[in-house]
Amino acid sequence: MRKTGLRVVLLSVLLTFGLAGAALAHVEVSPDQVPAGATETFTIEVPTEKEIPTTEVRIELPEGFEAGGAEAPSGWRGEVQGNALVWTGGEIPVANSEEFSFEATVPDEAGSFRLSAIQTYEDGSVAEWTGAPDSEEPAPVIEVASGGGASGEMDEPQHGDTQGSHEEVPDTGGVNAGLLLGVCVAVFAAASLLLRSAVR
């Protein structure tokens, strides 16, 4: 009975932390910091979190951005639709992610800008990555800094600036990677301790 109980506890711990680790995956943009007025090639990484493939990805740029071209991964088609970029024709398999690149010119004003990422699955269901950083489906964010110049050095964004339609959001870069590492360490530590107790 004691060993059975320990096995149940072990499975519960692994399931809990496993789900927590899976929840960390979200749509990310790189680079996420650029100088004002720059034309840059951005890469969006999109994960498939459901048990069915992703079949369409749409990125809607915020006001002040100007879309250039969309580069498509193998098996996909990319196109610019107004100020949005759309990729169709391919699949992101279950438990995998894919990178999509596009060119865009950012505004001349500094600030934090949320991109709207719309992910469509094979069954027609949609995941809208448009939320705040602490939400279940956070939007990818690009920080635009003033004073870039030719040297590539950027001043801090002027968060007091209220012009434009973009929203300011706190910087959470690096938090998810550290949290994921902590989750993995906790899972293995708990599993080791419980297994040792079970064999005694």
Image (tube, helix red, strand yellow):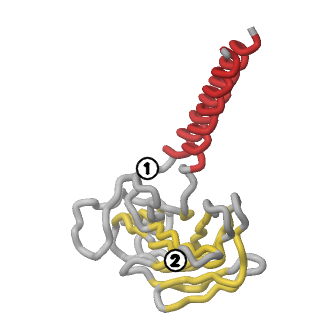
**Residue 100 x, y percent position in the rendering:** 64, 73
Quarter of the image with the N terminus is: top right
Question: Residue 94 versus residue 2: which sits nearer the camera?
Answer: 2
Q: Residues within 10 Å of mark 2 (few under 14, many from 20)?
A: many
Identify the residue position indicated by label 1 in the image.
Answer: 172
Q: Residue 50 occupies which quadrant of the picture?
A: bottom right
| Element class at badge 2 | strand
Compare marks 1 and 2 and give the one earlier in the sequence: 2
Q: Residue furthest top?
A: 200
Taking the spot 45% from the left edge, 60% from the top edge, the residue there is 138
Cα separation between marks 1 and 2: 21 Å
Type of amino acid under label 2: Ile
**Residue 15 x, y percent position in the rendering:** 61, 39
Taking the spot 50% from the left edge, 84% from the top edge, the residue there is 84
**Residue 101 x, y percent position in the rendering:** 63, 74
Q: Is residue 106 above or below residue 1?
A: below
Relative side of 32 to 169, left or right: right
User: Which of pointers 1 and 2 indicates the residue nearer the eye?
Assistant: 2
Q: Residue furthest bottom?
A: 82
Taking the spot 57% from the left edge, 71% from the top edge, the residue there is 42
Question: Residue 56 versus residue 52: which sits nearer the camera?
Answer: 52
- Residue 193 image label: none
Taking the spot 71% from the left edge, 15% from the top edge, the residue there is 198
Q: Is residue 2 above or below residue 86?
A: above
Type of amino acid under label 1: Thr
Q: Residue 193 occupies which quadrant of the picture?
A: top right
| Element class at badge 1 | loop
Identify the residue position indicated by label 2 in the image.
Answer: 59
**Residue 169 x, y percent position in the rendering:** 34, 58
